[in-house]
Amino acid sequence: MIEFDHVTKRYKSNVGLDDVSVKIDEGDFVFLVGPSGAGKSTFVKLILRELDADRGTITVKGKNVTNMSAREVPKLRRNIGIVFQDFRLLPKKTVYENVAFAMEIIHKPRKSIKKHVPQALTMMGIADKAKKYPDELSAGEQQRVAIARAIVNRPKILIADEPTGNLDPDTAWEIMQLLNQINQLGTTIVMVTHAKDIVDKMEKRVIAIEKGRIVRDEKGMYGYKEALADTTNMFDTVAVKKRDTFRAGFRRGGHR
Ligand code: ADP
């Protein structure tokens, strides 16, 4: 489903990924762990073709992403749902409208929207919140909306970038159950996380990246003594701003 073959990505003076080869099969549920600056975001951005690799080949759903034309990139991204730590819902749209929007922007027929949005909301257990606005919801409910939006177009792959980072442990666990359910219905999931407890409990495949290299790839444990806080989020506001501008750009790009 996703294959990296000797992939290297360098930034001017930094190594993003260094000769990474890995295969994620259809239906896998994979945790991507490692310290801040290890290369996790680079890995995700390469899958989405938000970045170009310097060397190596990336294949997603049998398509070579590395030499894909710009015209084909939106189609690639349509096959990949994304969920973020900070939900990224549109504040002036209702729950229903937030999820429907993901279908409208790719010109799905109204009939299909009317059918699939309620289905996605029901699956996420928030059908009764359809008319609410994001600021009327709890953090956990907002993340459920974000997941509904990410899966409403039935992507084959779901990327979750620290989806439980803003949630209390009980709520985080509920969200994990939903992701598990989505995975069991056949969606391949790649989840970037620092949540040690969750990784240890889920007993899924864990790929650990450090300094741009895969240092561990096995079923089971988080492998670090304690959750590695993502210091970028807390201290490096410039990096966060840059990243958020980048992601907002991607989101808007995707909506066109
Ligand atoms: P993680 O997501 O694991 O925190 P990243 O993939 O963001 O790691 O970063 C991997 C390395 O690449 C780090 O050393 C980081 O500083 C560097 N890096 C990431 N993005 C850029 C960029 N746009 N310009 C220069 N260096 C970058």
Image (cartoon, rainbow, N blue to C red):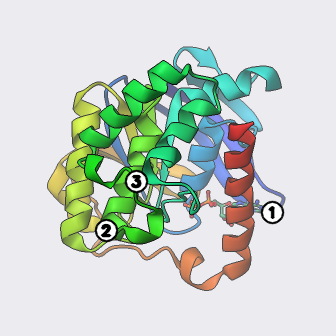
Amino acid at the residue labelled 3: Lys
Q: Which residue is mark 2?
A: 224
Disc 1 residue type (three-letter): Ser
Q: Is residue 81 above or below residue 114?
A: below
The residue that label 3 is drawn on is: 131
Residue 131 is situated, as x and y percent measured from the top left of the image, at: 40, 53
Q: Indicate the quadrant containing the N terminus: top left, top right, bottom left or bottom right.
A: top left
Cα distance in 3D space between marks 3 and 2: 42 Å
Front-lying residue, 242 or 107: 107
Q: Residue at 50% of width from left, 65% of height from top?
A: 86
Residue at 65% from the left image edge and 22% from the top image edge = 75
Q: Position of residue 7 (x, y in %)?
A: 64, 36
Reading the image, the residue beneath label 1 is 13
Circle 3: element type:
loop
- Picture coordinates of residue 142, whole percent (x, y): 39, 61
Q: Closer to us: mark 3 or mark 2?
A: 3
Residue 142 visible to an observer of this rendering: yes
